[in-house]
Amino acid sequence: MNYVAWDSSMSVGMDVLDSDHKQLIGMFNGLLQKGIADRDRDDLRALLDELTDYTAGHFAREEEAMERGGFPDLESHLAAHRYFTDEIAKLKESFNSSHTVMLRIDLVLLLKDWFIEHIQTVDAQYRPYVHAPTDDMPAGA
Ligand SMILES: [Fe+2]
């Protein structure tokens, strides 16, 4: 599994959301950095807590920006966010009964295959609609 690097092709056109995404990619790279096999349960628990906080703040910012910009496919995007939030909650619920190896694998796959992919494909769709709150430009301009 390789590190992921944020580059401008991943930009969604709003600084605050781009920095959220960079933070998520940093969490993913941090998970790989130490060596996945060396991650212990305390590490994983801390990462799950961090991801829970992250999703609450980031998804709210992203959803507000999409709503304000009149993004037409908001409902399916909200469903994607709910899916990710539920998956994190499920991992947390099963934390005590899960093997550490399975937790590591589930976290890596969730972050890489689902969420980083989400930034690159699903989030890219709202780019023409969102602007920084100070912008006065009409949506889609
Ligand atoms: Fe999103």
Image (cartoon, helix red, strand yellow):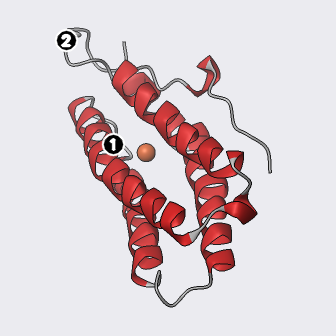
Estimate the x, y position of residue 63 in percent, counting from the top left.
28, 43
Residue 136 placement, left or right of 56: left
Q: Is residue 139 above or below residue 113?
A: above
Q: Amino acid at mark 1?
A: His
Out of 122 and 21, give the one closest to the viewer.
Answer: 21
State yes or no: Cβ of the residue under disc 1 lies below 8 Å from any atom of ligand 1: yes
Q: Nearer the viewer, mark 2 or mark 1?
A: 1
* Residue at 35%, 55% in the rendered image: 78
Q: Is residue 76 visible?
A: no
Q: Is residue 24 above or below residue 19?
A: below
Q: Amino acid at mark 2?
A: Thr
* Residue at 71%, 59% in the rendered image: 36
Q: Secondary structure at mark 1?
A: helix
Which is more N-terminal, label 1 or label 2?
A: 1
Dots 2 and 1: beta carbons under 8 Å?
no
Estimate the x, y position of residue 66 in percent, counting from the top left.
30, 36
The number of callouts visible is 2
Could you classify mark 1 by the number of other residues whose Cα lies within 10 Å: few (under 14), some (14-19), or many (20 or more)? some
Q: Is residue 15 above or below residue 44?
A: above
Measure the alpha-carbon separation of dots 2 and 1: 19 Å
Could you classify mark 2 by the number of other residues whose Cα lies within 10 Å: few (under 14), some (14-19), or many (20 or more)? few
Q: Secondary structure at mark 2?
A: loop
Residue 5 lies in what quarter of the image? Answer: top right
Estimate the x, y position of residue 77 in percent, counting from the top left.
40, 51
List the residue tagged with mark 1. 58
Residue 6 lies in what quarter of the image? Answer: top right
Mark on residue 134?
2
